[in-house]
Amino acid sequence: MIDMLEAGERENIEIDLLLQAVYRVSGFDFRKYMRSSILRRIQHRMNIDKIQTISGLQEKVLHEKDYVEKLLNDFSINVTEMFRDPEFFYSFRKNVIPHLRNLSEIRIWHAGCSTGEEAFSMAILLQEEGLYDKAKIYATDMNEKVLRKAEKGILPLSRMQSYTKNYLQSGGLQAFSEYYTADYENAYVLPKILGNIIFAQHNLAIDRSFNEFHVIICRNVMIYFTAELQNSVHELFFDSLSKGGFLGLGSKETLSNSPYAENYQIFDIAGKIYRKK
């Protein structure tokens, strides 16, 4: 019977079993991530370790201590940069900030923060607008390795020219170099910028709400999720947003197909910012 399976069907069975093994061993659930994205990362790991089949990966997950950590790092999406998509931060500065000024405390959740660049960017923006002292930024990711890096505020010096350009296009008010020190290899975000950022592990696929927020930002993360998982995450965000709170999505993401769309008003379509009714 096995020999009668099409190659694609056999591959899907192997992926199902691998992701089930990863979940049982680690507690991290990738079963509702887009298969095309997961498959690319599986093939990458197979090429590195010269493993012939996906079932061979599953065997290593089940029988080799700490091997699952390699796959968790492979599966985690860690693409980010300072002031990524500057038009989002420009819109946030001009349109959202005025609604936050009268709050006694500002709670912002950066979900899927990776190595922290967007959280650092928000901290700088709030500092320039005179609001950072009363703000708390909760930056979460499922990957502990990238969180430990984010806590240190270390950025590659080679990226700072690109980051400076993004900062200026986002409406930055100072010289970007005022927010970091540097050596021959790295830039280091100043302690005053890191001070009100709380980094913590949180898995959007399985974990629930942990606070009420005035702003939730989750940009270019849900494009890797199935529609079912996207809807689950939108439920989480809706439950976590205060009345009148703001939701920021990525340039390729939308609320239009979500069952929660009617509970938001489009605040800025270009910046992909929505406001909870």
Image (spheres, rainbow, N blue to C red):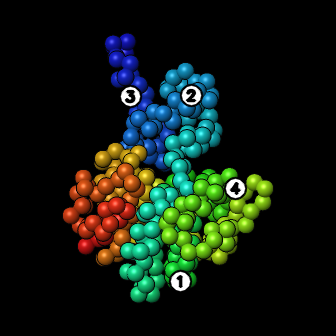
Mark nearer the viewer, 3 or 1: 1
Mark nearer the viewer, 2 or 1: 1
Q: CA distance from mark 4 to mark 3?
A: 41 Å
Front residue (pair 156, 171)? 171
* Dot 4 or dot 2, earlier in sequence: 2
Circle 1: element type: loop
Residue 147, above or below 57: below
| Numbered tag placed on residue 157 in the rendering | 4
Indicate left or right for 249 with 257 as reference. Answer: right
Q: CA distance from mark 3 to mark 2?
A: 16 Å
Q: Residue drawn at (55%, 21%), measured in percent from left and top?
A: 52
**Relative image position of residue 141 (x, y in whole percent):** 52, 57
Query: Number of numbered discs present?
Result: 4
Front residue (pair 89, 108)? 89
Q: CA distance from mark 4 to mark 1?
A: 27 Å
Amino acid type, residue under disc 2 in the picture: Met
Q: CA distance from mark 2 to mark 1?
A: 50 Å
Amino acid type, residue under disc 1 in the picture: Gly
